[in-house]
Structure formats: structure tokens, C-alpha cells
Amino acid sequence: MSNVDEIKAHIDIVDLVSETVSLRRSGKNFTGFCPFHANTRTPAFVVFPESGTWRCFSCNEGGDIFNFVMKKEGWDFSQTLISLAKRAGVELEPLTPEKKEEDERLEKLHDLLEEAVTFFMHHLTQSSQGKTALDYLLRRKLAPETIETFGLGYAPESWDATHQYFLGKGHSMDDLKEVGLVVERQEGEGVYDRFRHRVMFPIRDATGRMAGFGARCLRDEDVPKYLNSPQSTLFDKSHLLYGLDLARKAIRKEDQVVIVEGYMDVIGLHQAGFTNAVSPMGTAINEHQFRQLKRFSRRMVLALDADTAGEKATLRGLEMARQSLDRSPDIVTDASGIFDARGLIRSEGRLQADLRVTTLPEGKDPDEIALEDPQAWHTIIQASRPVVEHVMETLAANHNLDDPKVKQEISEQVLPLIEDVPNAVERDGYRQKLARLLRVDERVLVASAVRAPRRDRRRRQEPAGSYTEAPVLASEQKLAADLELHCLQLLLRHPEALSQVDRALQQAQLSRLLPQDFEKAENQIVAKLVQRSLEQDQLEPGQFIQENMPESLQVIVDDILSPSNYEEPNVNRQIEELVRSVLRLRYIRVREDLDQLRNFQEEVQQQGEIDLESYLEMIVNYSKTRDRIDQALKRPVQLD
């Protein structure tokens, strides 16, 4: 497997693109607004998870993860390769001196934080000041071995004890500032320790490297109650999950992760034997953190307290979601802890995960429950429910379900959530549950649904003169990938054939062969190089290609040019084969494009969009192109 293929195998294109584009599920694909041109009315950008590619029908750009990052960042292929390799954990080549120096600097900062863990642990167990903190932890029923496992500590009640210690150990003030152990005084004269008279919680990334600290105050009058390390190169609280380094193995083994709200919740659950628990760095959890967890399990349970998951919070969260339907569905709870059911359901659809909610007994924290009665915690997790069920049962609790007005109010809250569920079978099941809960005819709920029937019911309205085709099959996608390689193989052996291919395409009233005909970034680069070889006259095309081929692509090109099982000796026959391969490749792609455009058309019709005509026009144009390709495939190839 080449480096490029290995990187693609490690990086989910939906995860990557979602960091820039707000995507929503459209059948088996994901759609949104193209980030490369101005357009806020007609989403025409599609991500195809099965093939690992993307396409914009408006600006006619597309490709794989490499194309996307190259276009987004303005990088060349080599820069993109290095960046994505780092993201995927794929080692490419020896580090440059500059990169090695930067890695050594970051490693030094990680080591400094590890020393800080030891410093704070010492003060917790060996200093008289630390007794207050130790007593607090013991009152919370934490065992000494648990305290040691999580590296809990105590920050001395001093303005300078921490930084004076580390300066004495030879660390620089700049390093202490960068890892967040000290704060500059507002007057600009000197520094002081960030953490003072607090219980210290070391925070590590998923691999176990130190990233920063969380700190809890020990006096009621001290604020804030919890204080984190500042945002830095090492500490990004939106990308960290407390306890994940210790929970990874258990999450995989049990195929489930439980998400709780605080450090002590995670620690207490681990001590009680429930080692698959993690916590975000506050009350909000975002989609990036969900995607981190998805690498270990798609089964996720949100353990929320009664206030967060209760009726008032649910209603407020639904109202907030309704007022901002075009926002990125990243947040499950906002900064105030409001439960956003709609955002959670959309995240579940995008993640293809199984997200559930469980409610804690009022006034009880997870660690209290688990340490007092492990079976009680097990029962609570077993009772977790899908988000829609949680909302409908929460809204129905303590209400008179014989009152028609109550039934109407609950249905108006729940039906939009059901319509956001991407799977038709699940939607049908939830409608049945809601009908039974409210004791109404399910047909009444369907008729009064806030949103129109979803597009995946496949009701298509075709423009005049068009016809419905079968969707592109996975086998055809594999054929398209094989055709790409076959075309490049012939072009690299006979670059001069490109001009004859272009003439044959023009005779069929089709555009000439373009790099965009290929989906893979490396294939597009090779195709551009073939074009350039014919636009210059200093070297023979083959020699030009050889001398200008990026070193990072040489292995891929060698693979393309490896001997095939069948080689047609006649050059004209090879050119004919090349033309037909290009036509077949385009036919598969245009069918896939038409299928997606019709999904767009149906979606905007259901949502009452005013730009329907632009989709109809694109469908007509693509249909004409498909017909021209079909006719060209039925005729013999004419060469000069």
C-alpha cells in the first residue's frame, strides 16, 4: 500500500470535510454548501463516503481528501501529503531539521507538564497544606490507588511556589508561560502561579501525553470553581476528553462509551469498575469529540443530570435549535448545559452512531451512584434511550395526556425531531411510539408532520424528457477507479495520444479530457503533467513527464506503468481503447451526478426553496451530456 493509499485508509473524508463544511445526510451521501465559491441558496456540494470523494456541481470541482485540502489551504501535493500523513499517523520520510527541532520543543513541554504532575502529587500526599485537598478526595470515597492512577495533586496556596520550583530545576519562564503554569501580571511586572490552593486533575490526550490541568477550588468563595489550563499548542479543550487515555481499551472491549459531566464522575466510575467513562472539558460536547469517540465505538450514552435532561431544559433546547436551524449541528448542550436534542439527532445521523440518553436520579452524581451501588449504575446505563424517546417521554411526564391540547403541544415538539432522523425505519418506529404514547391514530401524526416526507423515500419528479435510471452501483464505482488507472497507463505510455482523444471527444460534442475527469488527486496531477508535456517543445513529452514528476508520486506512477496482463501492440488500437475508456468513465460519473442532482431537486422541492430552477437546468444539461456519451459509445471511434 502506498503512503497515499495508507493515508486515505486512515482518514474519513466526512470527518475531514465536516471541519470546514456543515454537512447533512442525503441518502448514503452528505451534502452542503461549497466552501470554494459564494453560494448560500442552492447547496450543490456532495461528499461520497463510499468512494472517499467530493464534488461541487456548481463550480465543477471535485476529487479526494488530497484535492480538498490542496484547494482549501492553497498547498501543493507534497505539502498536503505531509499534513495528512501527520493527521493519519503515517510516517513519510526523515524529519527536516526544522521539524525535528519543533518536535523536540513540544516534547520538552510535555516533559515539563509530567514534572508538574509529580510536583502536585507530592504536595497532595507529603505536605501539610495538601491535607485539605486529600481529605476532600477521601470524602469523595476515592481510594489511594485511584488517586495515584489519575495522578491527582494539590497546588500550594502560594503566588510563586510552583514557578520558583521549576525555575530552580532549570526550566525557562517562557516554557512555564506556554504550558500555562504561570500568568503574567496585568501591570506587566512579573508573573504569578495560575493554580493556587486547588485539587489538580492532570489532563492527557488520547495517547496519554500530558496536555494541561483542570483545577478545583477548595473554598466556596474562590472562583471559578473549576479552572483549566489556557488554550495552547498542547491544550485545546474542544479536542480533549478527560479519561480517554485510560478508557480507550474498555470502550473498545465493551463497544460502548459513557459520557459524563465532570472529572470526579469519571474517576469515581473507574474506581467502581466502569472504566468506559469520559468527560468533556465542561458542559458542552462537540462533534469533533464525538468523532474521536467513534474511532473506538459507535455506541455512546450521555449520562445527564435531572436539570440538564429535564423538561424545561429540553423545551429550551428545542426552541434554541428551532431558532437557528442553519447553524452547524455541533453542540449537544450549550455552555449553560441546555440539552439540544435536535443538534444531537443531526450529529447522530452524520456520525452514523447510536447515541442514547440516560437521566440520573435527582441530586445524585455518577460517582456517588456507582461507588455506593454499582448495580444501580449498571441499571441506569441499561435504561438509556434514544434521543427521540427521551424527549417524548420527558415532555409527557406529569402531564394529562387525555387533554387534546397537551397532545398537540407534545406532537409539535417531537415530530420535527423524528423527521430529522435519517433512517426511514427508525422514523416509522418513533411515530408508532409517539402515537401509542399520546393514544392517537398514527395517520394523524403523519398528516400533521411539520416537515414534508424525506427524500430517501425516493419519490422523484423528473423534468420533461428525462427518465429514471438505476443508481450507480458499488461495482461501477470500482470500475470507474480501474478505468482511471487504465486511462493514465495509456496516456503515460503515449502522451501524444491526448490530442487525438480530445478530437474524438469534440466530434461527439463533448469537452476535451480534463484533469477533473479523474477523482484521485494523484491521478489529476499526472493528467495535468501529460497536458503540460504537450504544451511545451523543449523536451520529448515522455522525457518531460519523467523529469517533472513529483518525487512523492513516483512510486504511484511506477505502479501505474507496471506490466498489465494484456497489452495491445497496435498504437491505434490503444488510442481507440483510451477514447472508449474515457467515455465509459464519464458515463458512470454522469449517471452518479444525475442521481445526486435529483436528490437535490427533491430536497429543495420539499423545503420550499426558491432556486429550484437551477437544479432543473443542471439536470437537463447533465441528461444531454449522458445521451451524447451514450451515442458516442455506440459508434466506432474515428481517428485521424
Image (cartoon, rainbow, N blue to C red):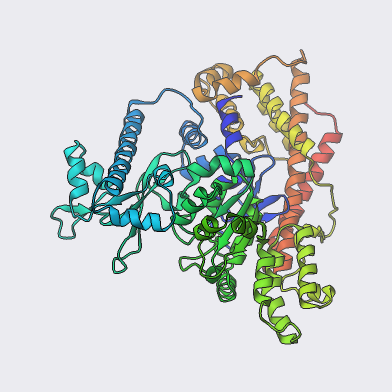
Q: Which image quadrant is residue 514 in?
A: top right
64 or 628, nearer to the observer: 64
Q: Kindly identify the residue that appears in the image at 79 percent across and 58 percent down.
A: 425
**Does the rendering let one see residue 123?**
yes
Q: Nearer the viewer, residue 224 or 518?
A: 224
- In this picture, residue 192 sits left or right of residue 337: left
The image quarter in which residue 431 lies: bottom right
In the picture shown, does residue 552 fall above or below 562?
below
Say if 50 sits above or below 3 in the image: below
Residue at the extreme left of the image, as rendered? 189
The spot of residue 531 in percent (x, y) is 59, 29
Q: Quadrant of the N terminus?
A: top right
What residue is rendered at 78% in x and 19% in y? 573
Horizontal and vertical percent position of residue 307: 53, 71
Residue 611 in sight here: no
Residue at (85% x, 56% y) in the render:
465
Q: Is residue 437 above or below residue 192?
A: below
User: How far across and down, in percent of the image, does residue 83 sit?
Assistant: 47, 36
Q: Position of residue 404 (x, y in %)?
A: 75, 86
**Relative to 458, is 246 on the left or the right?**
left
Quadrant housing the C terminus: top right
Side (left or right) of 262 relative to 442: left
Q: How many marks?
A: 0
Q: Nearer the viewer, residue 572 or 630?
A: 630
- Residue 562 higher or lower than 420, as above or below: above
Residue appearing at x 44%, y 46% in the figure: 146
Q: Residue 466: which quarter of the image?
A: bottom right
